Image (spheres, rainbow, N blue to C red):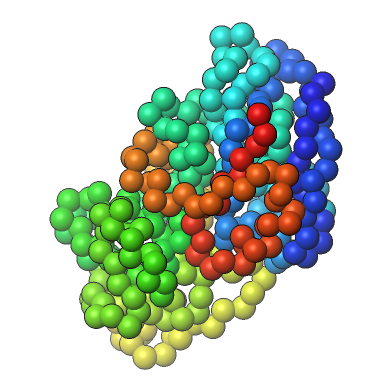
Amino acid sequence: MADARALWTVAPGRAEIRHAAAADPAPGWARVRALVSGISRGTESLVFHGKVPDSERQRMKAPFQEGEFPFPVKYGYAMVGAIEAGPRARIGETVLCLHPHQSCFTVREDALLPVPPTVPPERAVLAPQLETALNAIWDARPGPGDRVAVIGAGVIGCLTAHLAASLPATEVTLIDRDPSRRAVAAALGLRFARPEDTLPQGCDLVFHASGSAAGLDLALSLAAFEAEIIELSWYGSDTVPVSLGGAFHSQRLTIRASQVGHVAPSHRARWDHKRRLALALSLAADARLDALLGEQIPFDSLPERLPAVLAKPGALCTLIRYPD
């Protein structure tokens, strides 16, 4: 049995580190020492503030979550570590696991994905969010030459725009109020605009990832006749107004949800969650994605610093660094 420490959210806006234990692994299991984990700001902010609706508490559970919503709860799903005990052939292997923020943990081997040597641990923590963006692309099914707008240049918006732009001749514009995101867009090779700029009209497809009513209204205004708006924001228990007047009906627009909990219908018959996550992890080999990595925070300082991290709208991926 190895000593471990885990982050728990214990009340609205308050977290603490609690002692945990990581059992010696039985056959088919492995103990992992955490290296770095990432904060998925949108979802983890809702959890941190107790905004998971009653109806979604079972569906929103993370794979290795402990506790129940709203509090106390141990939550998170972007962990990269090194196997320190278990199958001899895998000792020292760097792996990805959908595990909450914890210094050491024991899980079944099949819950661990090997991190390719082309993907550094810090960038590997983007894999769960890459998986969300990949599923959104599968839901939307953009085609070569499409005019695409992505509203909201947080990590999910940037990754969705990045994947959409890989299609031949696709015109992708990333839109955000924050002018500092222009540099991030440039690093990813994307066009950037602010809402007050001249924006692409008549878009074949619009992804909304700003988490705001204003962003959703903007998405509706950019969509072409019979186009789809793919809603990637999750609002938790908040109520968000939607402007369905104006051209919504005459343009025959569609607003469709995309959520990573289910594989997109276009791929569901052939793909499972593990295969999809492995693909997302391989896509993290692109070094341009380093532009999405934000500040690094020592694990021990998380309770004090987490409120400020989660208060930043659209923040880049904050990394949690674990002690050696």
Residue 267 visible in the displayed image: yes
In the rendered image, residue 159, in percent from the top left (x then y), is placed at 39, 53
In the image as oriented, which residue stretches furthest toward the top?
88
Q: Residue at x 30, y 72 (%)?
A: 193
In the image as oriented, which residue stretches furthest toward the bottom?
246
The quarter of the picture where the N terminus appears is top right
In the rendered image, residue 142, in percent from the top left (x then y), is placed at 28, 57
In the rendered image, residue 10, in percent from the top left (x then y), is placed at 82, 56
Q: Which of 193 and 150 is in front in this view?
A: 193
Q: Which residue is drawn at 54% across and 83% down?
A: 241
Residue 108 visible in the displayed image: no
Q: Which residue is drawn at 30% across and 53% down?
A: 187
Q: Which residue is drawn at 65% across and 19% down?
A: 84
Q: Using the image, determine if residue 31 lies above or below residue 194.
A: above
Q: Using the image, determine if residue 34 lies above or below residue 88.
A: below
Would you identify the image quadrant in which residue 69 lies?
A: bottom right
In the rendered image, residue 202, in percent from the top left (x then y), is placed at 23, 76
Residue 227 left/right relative to 180 = left
The quarter of the picture where the C terminus appears is top right
